[in-house]
Image (cartoon, helix red, strand yellow):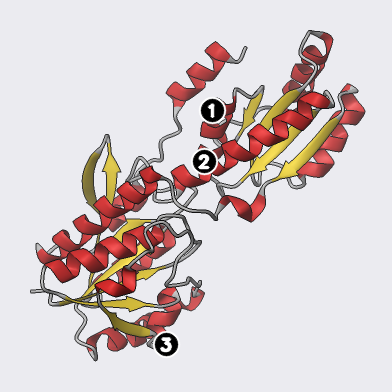
Amino acid sequence: MVKKIAVLTSGGDAPGMNACVRAVIRAGLQQGLDTFVVYEGYKGLVEGKIEQVDRNFVSDIINRGGTILKSARLREFKDEKVRAIAVEQLKKRGIDGLICIGGDGTYLGAKKLTEMGINTVGLPGTIDNDIASTDYSIGFDTCLNTIVDCVDKIRDTTASHQRCTFIEVMGNHCGDLALFSGIAEGVEMIITPDHPIPEDEIMETLKRLKQGKKKHSLVIVSEKVFPDIHEFAKKVTRETGVEARAEVLGHLQRGGSPSAFDRILATRLGVEAVELLLAGESGICVGQVRNKIVHYDIYEALELPRNKHIALLNIIDLVNK
C-alpha cells in the first residue's frame, strides 16, 4: 500500500506543469498520504533534492507557467547504476510512489524505476504534443494560443509590406503545433515533418499567389524542416521575386500562464495519477483520449503510432485553396 508519494517534472518545461503538481500534492494529502517534491527532475532525484511539502506549498501556482520544481536533463539516468542511486534516495525516505511529469524520455525513466521496485506513473507534460497515448499533452494548448497571438501580430506587418513570411514554430519532430496554428490562422501553407511540401511546389505556389490578387502570405513551418529558415526565405526571394522573410518564435512559445484547458487537463491527470497509485498500478502513463481519462503500460504507450491528423489536412484543402 502506497503511503508516501513524490512528484517531479522533467525535460522541457510546459505551461500547466505547476497545476499538475498542485493536483498531485492536494489529491495525495486528501487521501492521507505524505507528499514530497523532487527538484530538478531525475538529476535532483539522484542528488537527493527531495522535500516533504503540505498544501500551502502549492498555493497560488495553478496560474503560473514553467515549473516551480525546475527541470533538468540527465542522460546518465540511462545507466542502471545511476538509477540505483535514485531508488536509494526514495527508499531511505520511505517514498513508495513517484509521479513523473514530462515527455517520452521521462516516461522511459519512470518505467525503468518501476522495474527497480518503485511504483511510478507518468503524466504527459510537453508543448510538442508528441505523446501518442494522449490526444493532448499538458502545455500544448497554451503554446498553441501563444503562437496564434504572435502570428496575428506578424500578419499585420506581412500584409502592410506585401510580403511572404515563413514562421518557424516549435514541436521537435512533431508537426502538431504547426498544423493546428496554421489552421487557426488560415495560412497559405503548412509545412511539417509529417506533411512536407516539396520545394518546387512551395515556389510555384508563391509565384501563383503573387500573380493573383493575394499580395501577401503566411507559411507556418515546423522546426527542423529547414536547416536554416532565414536562408530558405532568401532563396524564395531570389527564385520567385516574392519578398520573403522568416520569423523564428523560439522559446517564448514555452512560457506564459497556462490556458484554462491546460489547467483543467493537468488537474484531471494529476488526480488520476494519485488514484492509480493507490489502486496498485505502476509503470503506467495517463492521458486523455476522446475526453476520457485513460492509462497504458508505458512500453505500450511508447510504441503507439502518433496521430498525423489526416482529417485536418482535408480541412486545409477545402478552406485554404
Q: As shown in the figure, which amino acid type bears the numbered disc 3?
A: Glu
Q: Quadrant of residue 185?
A: top right
Considering depth in this image, is 69 or 94 the residue closer to the camera?
69
10 Å crowding of disc 2: few (<14), some (14-19), many (20+): many
Residue 19 position in % (x across, y down): 35, 58
Q: Residue at x 35, y 87 (%)?
A: 85
Task: Report which residue position mark 3 lands on.
Answer: 47
Task: Report which residue position mark 1 lands on.
Answer: 184
Quadrant showing the C terminus: top right
Task: Report which residue position mark 2 lands on.
Answer: 144
Considering depth in this image, is 15 or 224 the residue closer to the camera?
15
Q: Can you say whether 161 is above or below 97 in the image?
A: above
Q: Quadrant of residue 146?
A: top right
Q: Residue at x 29, y 73 (%)?
A: 56
Answer whether labels 1 and 2 touch (C-beta < 8 Å): yes
Dot 1: element: helix
**Observer able to see residue 78:** no
